[in-house]
Image: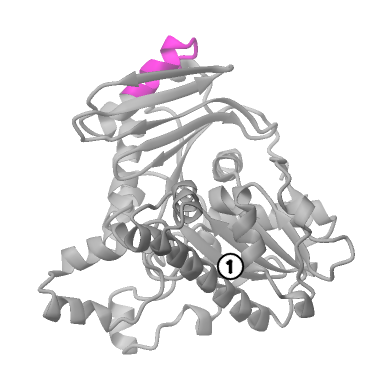
Amino acid sequence: MDLGTDDPVLVLNSGSSSIKYQLLHPRTSEVVAAGIVERIGEPEGGIEHRTGGQRIEQREPIADHSAGLRLVFEMFARTGRDLTRAGLRAVGHRVVHGGEVFYRPTLIDDEVLATIDELSVLAPLHNPANVAGIRSARALLPGVPQVAVFDTAFFHGLPAAAKTYAIDAKVAAAHGIRRYGFHGTSHEYVSGQVAQFLGREPAQLNQIVFHLGNGASASAIRGGRPIDTSMGLTPLEGLVMGTRSGDLDPGIVPHLMRSAGLDIDAVDALLNRDSGLKGLSGVNDFRALQELIDAGDPAARLAYDVYIHRLRHYLGAYLIDLGGVDVLTFTAGVGENSPAVRADALAGLQRFGIAVDPVRNVAKDRVARRISPDDAPVAVLVVPTNEELAIARAALALVIQD
């Protein structure tokens, strides 16, 4: 991608109670500053700001996203870079759900923002926070182009058989029910990095990518385009995650409503916030889970085994979907930092050409690397994701083109 300029871009990822941000130069990948505002709307919030080897923390109540973003601007000004005078070429916003409407980076105006807000019915935990962040950024930087980059965009063109749920077609069409997929920015970025690492064109490769963080997803990618992914209408479907259940029998929902007396909001909270690793073991952080396993906790052991079982389930499905795989890649917090997960997910698969070199697997390198033996038919890689860089490049490319 020839960006033609290296003007800085501010990237904002507004969550329900947080704002993650980076100021970076997309062409050189240089990060000028980064940080996070946490616990927005809670009695004790705060910001952590990192720049030039400095880390500054400040604790105070943060009423809403507008107050949080003003605090970000104050922190930049305090450390010598006023964002209103920084020559920003664009602000790139991570937006979780684009529905059927948005499937490429989009310049934000009043109409676009209203549509993103309307799509909150498909992502009630995410899109409202994305909208709040966009509104605040537009108010603080009125002359700077604002660009929405959608988590669902990469998976917009899934084959009909992969994106369609087997429910009444009229009901599905009326309510926008299909499999959209998420973490698309990461899957697209990582699969592109894989092709560069191997010195091959994306069109030549069958890939499986595991994005394993607190949220987790898998994708099957043929010739640079996804043919399947584990998340669906919402980010709840698929793999076991930190607090989300992943796949389950849909009949569990009415059963809980009838048998446990839970209303729909309680069921939604249970499946999104109190399930997954947290629901099985009491913790959602993988490091804490490993500590419990090492201490002999049987619930933690079971949670880990369920997690690995679901990974292998999707791996097997995607091997068949693709008709064979050239490269399998782990990324994101758990995928990049847990040798045990990588080894256990791929154990005993030598007959499929998949193997992990035990020495390479435990190396502490933070760069893209191969963890399979050189002679293994399937390359197994660890590739760090960089969604912020991908969003910045997409935003800059759009405003240059525009």
Can residue 78 be found in the magenta stretch? yes
Q: Is residue 207 above or below residue 359?
A: below
Judged left or right of residue 29, residue 133 is: left
Query: Residue 402 vs residue 43: left or right?
Result: right
Q: Is residue 402 above or below residue 78?
A: below
Type of the residue with mark 1: Ser
Question: Any magenta on residue 223?
Answer: no
Left or right of 29, for residue 111: left
Q: Residue at x 13, y 80 (%)?
A: 259
Q: Is residue 140 visible?
A: no
Is 278 in front, or is 99? 278
Which quarter shows the N terminus? top right
Residue 120, quarter of picture: bottom left
Question: What range is drawn magenta here?
Answer: 71-82
Q: Quadrant of the C terminus?
A: top right
Tag 1, which secondary structure? strand
**Dot 1 alpha-carbon crowd within 10 angstroms: few under 14, some 14 to 19, many 20 or more:** many
Q: Which residue is outermost to the front?
A: 296
Instruction: Tell me if residue 30 comes above or below residue 82 in the rendering.
Output: below
Report the side of 168 relative to 350 (left or right).
left
Residue at 62%, 49% (x, y): give it.
Answer: 336
- Give the vertical position of 352 relative to 263 (above or below): below
Q: Main secondary structure of the magenta part?
A: helix
Residue shown at 44% from the left, 47% from the top: 288
